[in-house]
Image (spheres, rainbow, N blue to C red):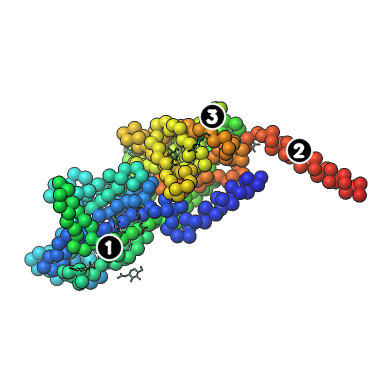
Amino acid sequence: MRGLIAVAGFFFIIALIPHAAAFDPLDPNGNITIKWDVMSWTPDGYVAVVTMNNFQMYRHIMTPGWTLGWTWAKKEVIWSMVGAQTTEQGDCSKFKGNIPHCCKKNPTIVDLLPGVPYNQQFTNCCKGGVLASWGQDPQSSVSAFQISVGQAGTSNKTVKLPKNFTLLGPGPGYTCGPAKIVPPTKFFTPDLRRKTQALMTWNVTCTYSQFLARKHPNCCVSLSSFYNETITSCPSCACGCENKHKCIKSDSKLLSVVGINTPRKDNAPLIQCTHHMCPVRVHWHVKLNYKDYWRVKLSVTNFNYRINYTQWTLVVQHPNLNNVTQVFSFDYKPLVPYQSINDTGMFYGMKFFNDLLMEAGPSGNVQSEVLLQKDKNTFTFKQGWAFPRKVYFNGDECMLPPPDTYPYLPSFAHHSSVAVSTLLISLLLLLIVLV
Ligand SMILES: *[C@@H]1O[C@H](CO)[C@@H](O)[C@H](O)[C@H]1NC(C)=O
Ligand SMILES: *[C@@H]1O[C@H](CO)[C@@H](O)[C@H](O)[C@H]1NC(C)=O
Ligand SMILES: *[C@@H]1O[C@H](CO)[C@@H](O)[C@H](O)[C@H]1NC(C)=O
Ligand SMILES: *[C@@H]1O[C@H](CO)[C@@H](O)[C@H](O)[C@H]1NC(C)=O
Ligand SMILES: *[C@@H]1O[C@H](CO)[C@@H](O)[C@H](O)[C@H]1NC(C)=O
Ligand SMILES: *[C@@H]1O[C@H](CO)[C@@H](O)[C@H](O)[C@H]1NC(C)=O
Ligand SMILES: *[C@@H]1O[C@H](CO)[C@@H](O)[C@H](O)[C@H]1NC(C)=O
Ligand SMILES: *[C@@H]1O[C@H](CO)[C@@H](O)[C@H](O)[C@H]1NC(C)=O
């Protein structure tokens, strides 16, 4: 019981942390950095390369991709862009001859789609705004474009930094800090024999908070084991039951209607009716117990008929992850945010095999098994130890069932301790009676 209270307390404390600020205890340094390198001054402004780096270990930006915004400090306009575009031109009626690409005070920028003509491309552009996580694919975690700014300062003394940066990835959740002047970026020529540098560089850092992103969790966890036939299902309404009246039964005839899976412009989900109403469920099954090892089966199920999850990630915290011996059919990477604790890792799909979690339905799940070596000092099936402490899907924390509903090990120790305490109480009563 004390163990259970400790576990509950632990969950309670941990649950408070991410709500306090945009801080993820499993990825304390995770952020998206937007860097502006001024490459040249022009008669009325400058040309800059804007680079977005996703330094988050396991949170990527899925299709329909990122949307970046800011507010100009003065009367700046965007003459032209390469590798991205603004969604609106705004009012450029003051201009004669050359018309700017965008005259809005607060431009909104989106990436171009793959396959745009060569002359509109820029290094690391044109991925439809999709940005991989740093942990999964660092090479694809960069996005960049070039921007030519007019009616701006033309020296590092007169240029004014844009303000109020906003980032959608693709939904809300990110908060961006102010732009800060940093040491100019150094560039190497392709032969590495010469170094050049930006005329001026500023950085903006954006961090994610699940609390800002959504009111309810986006996924839940269910549990089972070989040693108890109870399946602990996801908590009811774990993801809020707001869509309950719009959900669709798994045997509904509507599912055969053409176009039912087509994503909506506003990304409204179409969720299968379940008691938890979560778009995603993660199931952790303690499958086998060997002398020196134990085996867990992990499955992730998609309940949204309108999303294919590309490059999905699953993060798990469990004290035995320091001894992962083998992971079958998922890729695995330990995450060690605090050098001393090795209890967290990320699972993700193997490229071209199961890195796509398909829409709800017969193919809407991915599975794996994990073989863990027991550490004799800590290993136990008692008190829910074999179950994960935290689970994240695509960087959002999943709701776990309450610890007192976990499948219990039918334990003799448990019974004997009850027997001992009963005996003690009877002895005490006997003493009182005697005295
Ligand atoms: C952003 O992330 C990088 C990489 O993890 C880290 O070095 C940097 O300190 C972070 N920046 C902030 C402001 O947290
Ligand atoms: C600015 O951002 C770049 C990545 O875009 C990063 O490498 C660099 O360390 C950042 N500089 C500072 C001072 O945070
Ligand atoms: C501006 O440029 C001058 C020299 O051209 C340099 O000394 C100064 O540090 C620069 N200031 C900033 C903010 O980059
Ligand atoms: C930036 O945003 C804040 C809060 O949303 C607002 O009060 C402020 O006026 C904005 N600044 C500019 C220059 O738009
Ligand atoms: C998911 O991918 C499959 C195969 O590529 C495709 O047929 C289906 O339309 C996609 N579903 C959604 C919701 O995008
Ligand atoms: C963490 O544990 C994994 C095995 O799950 C091991 O491969 C890795 O080396 C460990 N890392 C550290 C820093 O202890
Ligand atoms: C893994 O378990 C073995 C056996 O208990 C133990 O000797 C070893 O130290 C563990 N490895 C780590 C990285 O904790
Ligand atoms: C299995 O676990 C459930 C839920 O914790 C518990 O109520 C039940 O007593 C356990 N069954 C056995 C045989 O111990």
Queried on whether the Cβ of the residue with tag 1 lies below 8 angstroms from ligand 2, the answer reads yes
Examine the rendered structure and indicate whether residue 375 appears above or below residue 425.
Answer: above
- Is 427 displayed left or right of 254 in the figure? right
222 or 176: nearer the eye?
176
Circle 1: residue type:
Val
User: Distance of mark 3 from mark 1, alpha carbons?
Assistant: 52 Å
Residue type of the residue flagged with mark 3: Asp
Instruction: Give the mark nearer the N terminus: 3 vs 2.
Output: 3
Q: Nearer the viewer, residue 91 or 206?
A: 206
The structure residue drawn at horizontal position 63% and vertical position 49%, both measured from the top left corner, is: 5
Residue visible at 47% across and 43% down in the picture: 342
Image quadrant where one finds the N terminus: top right
- Tag 2: amino acid: Ala
Picture mark count:
3
Q: Is residue 407 left or right of residue 204?
A: right
Q: Which residue occupies the foreground of this view, 5 or 404?
A: 5
Q: Residues within 10 Å of mark 2 (few under 14, many from 20)?
A: few
Q: Secondary structure at mark 2?
A: helix
Ranked by sequence position, the earlier of labels 3 and 1 is 1
**Residue beneath the point at 14% across and 71% down:** 94
Q: Where does label 2 land, which residue?
A: 419
- The circle drawn on residue 292 is 3
